[in-house]
């Protein structure tokens, strides 16, 4: 008999997150594998971050009150329904810990974000993977898997890594058929980039429904991934619970200050959206010229299918690019062996990507 500590069931099934492997050779470094904003952080946020340096001997504002007010004002939301997290990852984790445990089920979609099954496992709950319809989440398939054991449904909208989204009518239909005891998490990490009339980030539903929380992040368009800053908005039955359990000082002072400044920097937000609007179609066109099949996307990244006729596998393409300092994401974790994903970079980075892919595929 072993007397070593035994973790919750499911935890040993987890594959540890693969850290970014630093390139072996010095030289060009173009990181397109984590969907971070192409334009870096807002200069205003950097200023606020530096200004916070002289005060780092102080504990941060608990509850991130100044940031809560700034978010409420910027988005026209009720400050009472906000929760701030150390990245939205922290909130995903806390939602699992607070609402699901051994014997409970947590629904996520086939090509949904990997954090959902990871956090469900970490809470001892059973993650239930629901098949997508093509590369898009299927409301009917999700509803068909709801049982009395279901505690949480996670939906990334838009979804990472596919870049697809569900229209407002579909999200509302999903919610309308879910038992009110099930927490519906609408993870809108890429909402800032979406320019579709039929899209909702979920704030409207989170406002009125007793069981919905919308998650947002400063890690993508706002360019603050390194500071870890995310937030949630929704039903008191969910948000009040999270506000009780998160650490009193869960968000550091520099992140809070930079977040407030980033919200105020509307010109930076406009530049970021314009950059994405211009570059997504350009990049897609170039990839098609090379015989690749980029999927449609509403976000700042795209999934690319590599047809057999290119004579290359995604591994070969990614390795070729990595050797030349360009890093993209393989999709084996998601069971997509003929795809890779990358994010839109700066103009120079996108050009470098075209040149390198051309060299690779025409070789
Ligand atoms: C990047 C991403 C997040 C953001 O996580 P943070 O912890 O806020 O950096 C959340 N959900 C999805 C689907 C993402 O792709």
Image: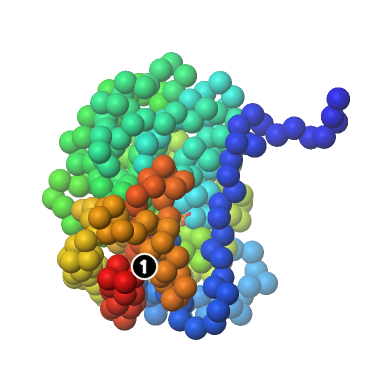
The quadrant the C terminus occupies is: bottom left
Q: Position of residue 144 (x, y in %)?
A: 32, 21
Residue drawn 63% across the image and 73% down it = 56
Residue 132: image quadrant is top left
Between 215 and 104, the residue placed more toward the observer is 104
Please report the residue visible at 56 percent of the width from the left and 52 percent of the height from the top.
Answer: 17
Q: Which is nearer the eye, 243 or 69?
A: 243
Does residue 56 show up? yes
Identify the residue shown where x is 79% and y is 35%.
Answer: 5
Above-or-below relation of 275 to 314: below
Determine whether the beta carbon of the residue marked 1 sits less than 8 angstroms from the nearest atom of ligand 1: no
**Horizontal and vertical percent for residue 324?**
43, 76
In the displayed structure, would residue 159 be above or below residue 98?
below
Instruction: Give the x, y percent position of residue 214.
Output: 36, 44
The location of residue 57, given as percent across then percent down, is 67, 72
Which residue occupies the foreground of this view, 324 or 251?
Answer: 324
Position of residue 47 in the picture relative to residue 144 (left or right):
right
Q: Is residue 219 above or below residue 331?
A: below
Q: Residues within 10 Å of mark 1 (few under 14, many from 20)?
A: many
Q: Which residue is mark 1?
A: 37
Residue sitting at the far top: 148
Taking the view exactly as shown, the residue that stands out farthest to the left is 197
Quarter occupied by residue 58: bottom right
Q: Which residue sits at x=61%, y=32%?
A: 10
Q: Nearer the viewer, residue 261 or 14?
A: 14
Element marked by disc 1:
loop
Query: Residue pushed farthest bottom?
Result: 27
Q: Quadrant of residue 357?
A: bottom left
Residue 62 appears in the rendering: no
Coloring basis for residues: rainbow
In the image, is 87 to the left or to the right of 38?
right
């Amino acid at each position: 008999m072993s007397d070593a500590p035994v973790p919750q069931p499911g935890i040993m099934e987890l594959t540890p997150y693969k850290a970014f492997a630093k390139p072996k050779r010095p030289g060009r470094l173009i990181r397109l594998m984590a969907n971070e904003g192409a334009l870096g952080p807002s200069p205003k946020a950097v200023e606020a971050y530096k200004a916070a340096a002289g005060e780092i001997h102080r504990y941060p504002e608990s509850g991130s009150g100044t940031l809560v007010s700034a978010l409420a004002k910027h988005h026209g939301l009720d400050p009472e329904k906000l929760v701030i997290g150390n990245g939205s990852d922290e909130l995903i984790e806390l939602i699992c810990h607070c609402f699901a445990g051994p014997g409970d089920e947590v629904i996520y979609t086939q090509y949904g974000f990997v954090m959902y099954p990871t956090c469900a496992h970490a809470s001892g709950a059973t993650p239930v993977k629901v098949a997508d319809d093509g590369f898009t989440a299927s409301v009917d398939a999700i509803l068909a898997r709801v049982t009395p054991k279901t505690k949480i449904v996670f939906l990334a909208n838009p979804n990472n890594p596919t870049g697809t989204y569900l229209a407002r009518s579909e999200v509302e239909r999903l919610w309308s058929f879910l038992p009110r005891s099930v927490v519906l998490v609408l993870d809108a990490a890429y909402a800032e980039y979406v320019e579709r009339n039929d899209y909702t980030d979920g704030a409207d539903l989170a406002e009125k429904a007793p069981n919905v929380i919308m998650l947002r992040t400063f890690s993508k368009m706002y360019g603050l991934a390194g500071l870890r800053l995310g937030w949630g908005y929704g039903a008191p039955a969910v948000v009040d619970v999270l506000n009780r359990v998160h650490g009193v000082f869960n968000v550091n002072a520099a992140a809070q200050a930079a977040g407030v400044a980033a919200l105020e920097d509307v010109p930076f937000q406009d530049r970021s959206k314009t950059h994405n609007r211009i570059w997504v179609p350009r990049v897609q066109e170039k990839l098609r010229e090379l015989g690749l099949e980029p999927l449609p996307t509403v976000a700042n990244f795209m999934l690319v299918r590599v047809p057999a006729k290119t004579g290359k596998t995604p591994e070969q393409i990614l390795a070729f690019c990595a050797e030349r300092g360009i890093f993209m994401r393989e999709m084996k974790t998601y069971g997509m062996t003929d795809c890779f994903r990358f994010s839109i970079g700066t103009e120079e980075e996108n050009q470098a990507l075209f040149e390198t892919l051309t060299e690779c595929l025409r070789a």
